[in-house]
C-alpha cells in the first residue's frame, strides 16, 4: 500500500524540478504575469501611434525593460517570503518556497536583473522612462519589505504598478497624456486589485495561515466598497475621456469613440460578476477564462481602433 501511494505522488512532484535551477528561476520570474506589461502600449494605442516601426521598436524595448524590473521584484519578493509561502496552500509550489531555487540565488538574480535593467534604461531610453522604472523598482521593493503590511497603502502600491505600465509607453514616445486617461487607468487598476483582494478575503475567510496576513485587517465590506467605488469612478472617467474634445477633426461615419463606452461599461459589469462572487483572481486569468468577457474586450478594442483609424 505504501509503495502504491508513493508511486501515485511521484509523477506530481517530478515536473516541478524538471527544468532544474534555470527552469525554477524562469518560473519564479512569473512569465504568466508578463502579459500585464502589454499595458505599455495603452497610451500609444489610444493616441494612434502604433503604426510606425520606430514606435514599435521603442515600445518593445520598454516592454523588455519593464519585464526585467517586474521579474526582479518577483524574485526578491519570493526570496523574502519563502518561509511564509511554504505555509500557503498554493504559494508553497513557488520555486523558491519549494526549494528549487535557493533564497540566496533568488536575491542575487533579482538584484542583478534590476541593475542590468536600470543600466540599459539609462543608456537606451528617454530619461523620463528611466525615472519611471527607478520609481517602480523603488516602490515595489519597498512593498516587498514593508508596504505590503500597511493597510490601504498596499492597495495603492499595487495599483501604481499598473498605472506606471499604462503611462510609460506615452513617455517613451513623447505623447501628452489626457487627465481622463490617467484617471481611467488608475481607478480601473484599483478596481481589479481590490476585487482580487476581496476574492482572496472571501475564499480564505477563517483559514489561518492560508493567505496574506494583512487580509485579516480588512473587512470584506470595506474591500467590496473599494472595488465598487473604483468601478464607478473608472466608468465615469472613461465616459468623460471619450467625450473629450481632442481638437482633431473626425471622419467617422459612426461615433466609434463614444460608442466604445458601451463595451467598456459591459466589461466592467461582467468583471464585477466575478468580483461579487469572490472569484476574481489575477486579472489576466479572469479575462482569459471567461469567453464573454474576452469577446467584449475584442469588441471594445475594435471600436476604439476604428475611432483612432478615422481621426
Image (tube, rainbow, N blue to C red):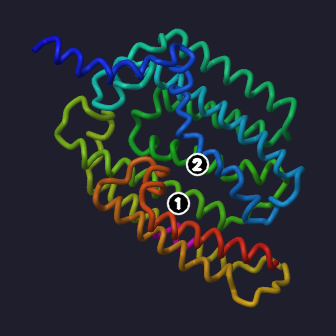
- Disc 2: which residue: 162
| Residue for point 45% across, 46% down | 155
Quadrant in the picture for residue 99: top left
The magenta span reads 232-237
Quadrant in the picture for residue 262: bottom right
Magenta: main secondary structure = helix
Q: Per the image, is 193 magenta?
A: no
Decide which of 264, 15 is in the foreground and name it.
15
Mark 2 or mark 1: which comes first in sequence? 2
Residue 276: percent from left, percent from top: 31, 62
Q: CA distance from mark 2 to mark 1?
A: 9 Å
Instruction: Say the numbered circle drawn on residue 20.
Output: none
Q: Are marks 2 and 1 in contact (CB under 8 Å)?
A: yes
Q: As displayed, is residue 66 above or below residue 159? A: above
- Disc 1: which residue: 188
- Asked whether, in this view, residue 182 is left or right of residue 148, the answer is right
Element assignment for label 2: helix
Amino acid at each position: 500500500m505504501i509503495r502504491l501511494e508513493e508511486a501515485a505522488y511521484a509523477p506530481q512532484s517530478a515536473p516541478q524540478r524538471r527544468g532544474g535551477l534555470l527552469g525554477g528561476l524562469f518560473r519564479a520570474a512569473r512569465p504568466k504575469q508578463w502579459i500585464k506589461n502589454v499595458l505599455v502600449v495603452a497610451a500609444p494605442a489610444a493616441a494612434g501611434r502604433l503604426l510606425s516601426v520606430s514606435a514599435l521598436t521603442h515600445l518593445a524595448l520598454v516592454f523588455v525593460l519593464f519585464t526585467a524590473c517586474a521579474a526582479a521584484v518577483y524574485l526578491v519578493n519570493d526570496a523574502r517570503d519563502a518561509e511564509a509561502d511554504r505555509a500557503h496552500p498554493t504559494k508553497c509550489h513557488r520555486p523558491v518556497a519549494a526549494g528549487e531555487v535557493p533564497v540566496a540565488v533568488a536575491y542575487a538574480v533579482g538584484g542583478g536583473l534590476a541593475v542590468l535593467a536600470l543600466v540599459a534604461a539609462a543608456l537606451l531610453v528617454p530619461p523620463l522612462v528611466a525615472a519611471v522604472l527607478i520609481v517602480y523598482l523603488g516602490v515595489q521593493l519597498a512593498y516587498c519589505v514593508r508596504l505590503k503590511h500597511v493597510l490601504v497603502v498596499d492597495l495603492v502600491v499595487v495599483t501604481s504598478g499598473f498605472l506606471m505600465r499604462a503611462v510609460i509607453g506615452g513617455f517613451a514616445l513623447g505623447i501628452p497624456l489626457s487627465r481622463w486617461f490617467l484617471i481611467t487607468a488608475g481607478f480601473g487598476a484599483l478596481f481589479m486589485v481590490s476585487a482580487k483582494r476581496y476574492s482572496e478575503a472571501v475564499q480564505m475567510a477563517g483559514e489561518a495561515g492560508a493567505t496574506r496576513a494583512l487580509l485579516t485587517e480588512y473587512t470584506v465590506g470595506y474591500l467590496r466598497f473599494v472595488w465598487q467605488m473604483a468601478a464607478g469612478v473608472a466608468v465615469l472617467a472613461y465616459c468623460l475621456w471619450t467625450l473629450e474634445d481632442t481638437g482633431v477633426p473626425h471622419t467617422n461615419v459612426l461615433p466609434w469613440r463614444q460608442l466604445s463606452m458601451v463595451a467598456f461599461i459591459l466589461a466592467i459589469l461582467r468583471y464585477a460578476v466575478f468580483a461579487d462572487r469572490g472569484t476574481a483572481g489575477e486579472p489576466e486569468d479572469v479575462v482569459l477564462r471567461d469567453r464573454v468577457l474576452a469577446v467584449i474586450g475584442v469588441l471594445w478594442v475594435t471600436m476604439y481602433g476604428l475611432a483612432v483609424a478615422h481621426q
